């Protein structure tokens, strides 16, 4: 049977996206393979010192003391929350007027002699550079920010902080660097299996999904009403701080957390128990790597408060399955590193990606071709550079395609610099429609203003679900970045974005408290008994329905 389109007077089908892209690219001149150059420094540092050691070893404290004594410099961290934490510590020590904070979402006292920032915001020159979590240089998406500072940062003194596993990377970047090894202040003890009904105050229980953590928090609340804190990756930063403070000041005796505990959340505890030893990594469900376990377990032990930290696995929750052998074996480093040191893996590579000035173009229509040419040339040139690895340009091309396609559909254009800034915006891959909206707003499309006005409306959060409030907080973070880059465009201001972020955080905190008090996750919808948090029914009720 002929389709309805075929009966419309022989009208031709509208070209598909691939055809339209191919037609567009035919009009873009092919680029010669660009010359690839490594970032370089003109002035070498007077000193390069690496502080290497595990969590709770004092390596960051020592570096911040050096920065404070120097009086001028940069503390560059991988996460906004770590930059904020360093800012609070240094401000309390030196006075707020001497310390600033710069991240993609905020600017505080930008002209201060000491600046705490995320790695992407660190300038390429100054007096002192404290580069935290140096092992992030191998990260597939953000590693280039660390690599450029390693290769081109012109500072009088450079301090590199990281895990012992980063020793090969440090030696590749600075063969003559002074290496200082730090040991844990509070040793870790293996405490074995601990029953759920025998938990003691000061315990953190770790699982590896948001639903699992909420289920654990609900179970804990049944025994310890209102004395449970919750942490997971999708929480707004303000909500995280509330939960961390509740645990640290004794308002909460227990905490249920995901592995966000090992990524920028400084939450020391007396005892840490694993409720699971597998996680879904975006591709498959697998056993935890030993370095992942060690990174999380390192939070156990409060130096100055308890003599030792205790690590074990949780038992007594039907759906929580943790292999004690996997955790126990991961507490002892077993991979040999240079100089007879031992760690959990080898970090010896750094990622690199192009900057706009590395691309010999003047027209945004040439960006995709230029990125591919740069990537090809970089792979060929650095194939023999054992410690440099070229980042994937796939995410950049995906963002670029979204922005340029929407601009063409609306008959709008952006300059090369604006296009590059937007495709590098801190927007997740699942939120590219917001990126397209922002691009159109910058291009002068007033039709985007009502969309942005709606997104900034805090009133829509009054009855929102936990998931919607979390999404609003992520949107607020993006809009704060946008307001800093493009003041007043589309009606977006720092004040409005900050108000949305706070309202979303407040809503998340309220919904969390309600969920923990009356859990729906980890409870059978039929009988109300405990069940696996990823199923709506317990095994008994499911079997009965079948």
Image (cartoon, rainbow, N blue to C red):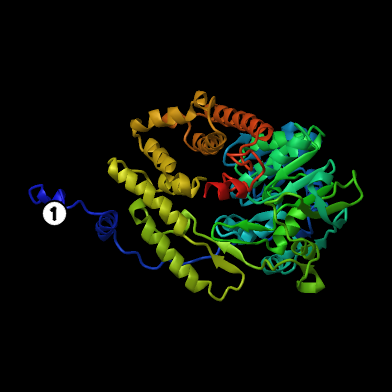
- Left or right of residue 218: residue 271: right
Asked whether 258 or 515 is in front, the reply is 515
Q: Residue furthest bottom?
A: 384
Q: How many marks?
A: 1
- Check disc 1 and report the residue beneath it: 2
Q: Nearer the viewer, residue 11 or 455?
A: 11
Please provide percent x and percent y for residue 275: 72, 52
Q: Farthest right residue?
A: 307
Residue found 40% across the figure and 31% down from its top: 451
Res 313 seen here: yes
Circle 1 crowding by C-alpha within 10 Å: few under 14, some 14–19, many from 20: few
Q: Is residue 516 left or right of residue 54?
A: left
Q: Where does the image place residue 513, in percent across and percent down from the top left? A: 67, 31
Say which residue appears at 74% left-offset and 61% top-offset.
Answer: 323
Residue drawn at (7%, 48%) of the image = 9
> In this orientation, does residue 46 appear?
no
The structure residue drawn at horizontal position 44% and vertical position 27%, both measured from the top left corner, is: 453
Give the image location of residue 136, x and y in percent.
64, 57
**Quick one: 82 or 172, which is closer to the camera?**
82
* Quadrant containing the N terminus in the rendered view: bottom left
């Amino acid at each position: 049977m002929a389709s309805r389109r075929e009966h419309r007077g022989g009208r031709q089908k509208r070209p598909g996206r691939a055809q339209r892209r191919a037609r567009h690219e035919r009009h873009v001149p092919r680029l010669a393979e660009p010359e690839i150059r490594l970032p370089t420094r003109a002035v070498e540092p007077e000193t390069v010192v690496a502080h290497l050691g595990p969590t709770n070893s004092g390596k960051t404290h020592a570096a911040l003391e050096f920065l404070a004594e120097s009086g001028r410099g940069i503390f560059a961290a991988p996460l906004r929350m770590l930059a904020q934490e360093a800012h609070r510590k240094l401000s309390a020590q030196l006075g707020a007027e001497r310390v600033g904070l710069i991240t993609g979402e905020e600017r505080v006292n930008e002209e201060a002699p000491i600046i705490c920032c995320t790695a992407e915001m660190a300038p390429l020159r100054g007096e002192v550079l404290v580069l935290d979590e140096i092992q992030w240089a191998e990260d597939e998406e953000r590693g280039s920010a660390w690599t450029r500072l390693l290769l081109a940062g012109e500072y009088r003194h450079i301090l590199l902080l990281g895990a012992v596993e980063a020793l090969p990377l440090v030696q590749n970047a600075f063969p003559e660097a002074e290496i200082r090894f730090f040991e844990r202040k509070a040793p870790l003890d293996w405490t074995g299996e601990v029953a759920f009904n025998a938990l003691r105050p000061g315990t953190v229980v770790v699982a590896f999904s948001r639903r699992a953590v909420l289920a654990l928090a609900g179970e804990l609340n049944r025994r310890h009403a209102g004395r449970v804190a919750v942490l997971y990756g999708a929480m707004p930063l303000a909500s995280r701080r509330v939960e961390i403070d509740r645990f640290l000041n004794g308002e909460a005796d227990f905490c249920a957390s995901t592995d966000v505990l090992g990524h920028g959340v400084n939450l020391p505890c007396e005892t840490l128990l694993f409720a699971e030893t597998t996680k879904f990594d975006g591709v498959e469900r697998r056993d935890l790597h030993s370095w992942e376990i060690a990174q999380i377990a390192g939070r156990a032990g409060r130096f100055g408060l308890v003599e030792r930290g205790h690590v074990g696995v949780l038992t007594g929750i039907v759906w929580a399955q943790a292999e004690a052998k996997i955790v126990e074996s991961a507490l002892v480093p077993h991979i040999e590193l240079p100089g007879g040191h031992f760690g959990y893996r080898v970090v010896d590579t750094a990622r690199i990606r192009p900057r706009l000035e590395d691309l010999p173009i003047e027209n945004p229509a040439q960006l995709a071709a230029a990125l591919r040419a740069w990537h090809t040339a970089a792979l060929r040139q650095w194939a023999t550079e054992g410690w440099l690895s070229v980042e994937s340009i796939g995410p950049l091309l995906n963002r670029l395609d979204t922005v340029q396609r929407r601009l063409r559909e609306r008959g709008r254009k952006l300059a090369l610099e604006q296009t590059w800034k937007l495709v590098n915006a801190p927007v997740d891959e699942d939120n590219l429609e917001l990126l397209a909206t922002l691009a159109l707003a910058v291009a002068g499309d007033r039709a985007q203003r009502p969309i942005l006005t709606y997104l900034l409306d805090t009133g829509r959060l009054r009855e929102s679900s936990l998931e919607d409030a979390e999404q609003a907080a992520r949107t607020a973070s993006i809009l704060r970045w946008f307001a800093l880059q493009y003041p007043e465009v589309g009606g977006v201001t720092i004040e409005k974005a900050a108000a949305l972020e706070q309202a979303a955080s407040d809503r998340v905190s309220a919904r969390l408290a309600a969920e923990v008090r009356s859990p729906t996750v980890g409870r059978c919808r039929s009988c109300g008994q405990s069940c696996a948090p990823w199923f709506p029914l317990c095994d008994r009720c499911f079997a009965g329905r079948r």
